[in-house]
Image (tube, grey):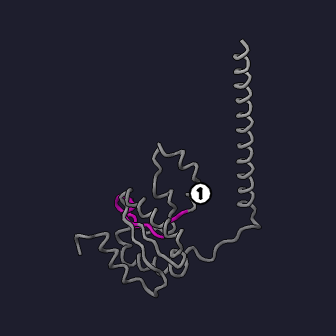
Amino acid sequence: MQPIIYFLFILIFTIILLLIYIIIEKRKRENIEEALLQTMFSHDKINVKDELLTHNEQRFYRDLQKVFGEEYYIFSHVSLTSLLKIRPDQKDLYEKHANINKFYFDFVLVAKEQFKPVLVVELNDRTHGHNKRFQRDAYFSSMLASADIRHFSCESNFLTYDHYMEEIKKILHPSVI
């Protein structure tokens, strides 16, 4: 009879500790969320950006619009989670890596008829040369390939981007050219 009492005592004690841990973790999360909301909604801590796109991005967007605007919608700064859907069996992984929301693609061309994303364009500035950024870009490229979305990456800092527009045409319409 003694071993059963010890077992029950240990079981009840473990359950109580687990409940205390869950309550503490929930309060920590609530405190973090509350601090974030206070920062977000304290109007004295925010300013409106002067421009949504950098000068290079603006020039690239204009070239994309000029060449592809009739056939495609062109969106800028599209978040990874807006473009790619996490499979239901991977939801726990997604929740563990919630910071995935901060990643975005520079431009996405979307077919006007079906409203389907067909091409992601990354305009690489000097930050893309860093090793971590290079690894991240390679990871995103493979992710897009598995989702059957074409990807084009090019260098920024040109006065015009006409030379890239021909390459993008070849990607979008390989049989025409």
How many marks do you count on the picture?
A: 1
Classify residue 26 as left or right of residue 163. Answer: right
Q: Is residue 68 above or below residue 114?
A: below
Per the rendered image, the range of residues in magenta is 103-119
Check the image and report above or below for 147 versus 133. Answer: above
Residue 47, image x, y percentages:
70, 71
State which quadrant residue 49 falls in.
bottom right
Instruction: Give left or right: position of 150 versus 133.
Output: left
Q: Quadrant of the N terminus?
A: top right
- Residue farthest to the top? 1
- Comparing 94 with 35, the one in front is 94
Residue 71: x and y, percent? 34, 69
User: How would you classify the magenta stretch by its main secondary structure?
Assistant: strand
SS of the residue at dot 1? helix
Q: Residue at x 52, y 61 (%)?
A: 79
Under mark 1, the amino acid is Asn
Picture coordinates of residue 161, whole percent (x, y): 41, 83
Vertical arrangement, residue 108 with respect to residue 56, above or below: above
- Position of 31 compared to 98: left or right? right
Q: Residues within 10 Å of mark 1 (few under 14, many from 20)?
A: few
Which image quarter is the C terminus in? bottom left
Q: Residue at x 77, y 67 (%)?
A: 44
* Residue 40: quadrant of the picture: bottom right
**Residue 2 pos. (x, y %):** 73, 14
Q: Is residue 73 magenta?
A: no
Q: Can residue 117 be found in the magenta stretch?
A: yes
Residue at 43%, 70% (x, y): give it. Answer: 121
Identify the residue under disc 1: 99
Q: Residue at 35% across / 58% down in the picture?
A: 148
Q: Is residue 4 left or right of residue 156?
A: right
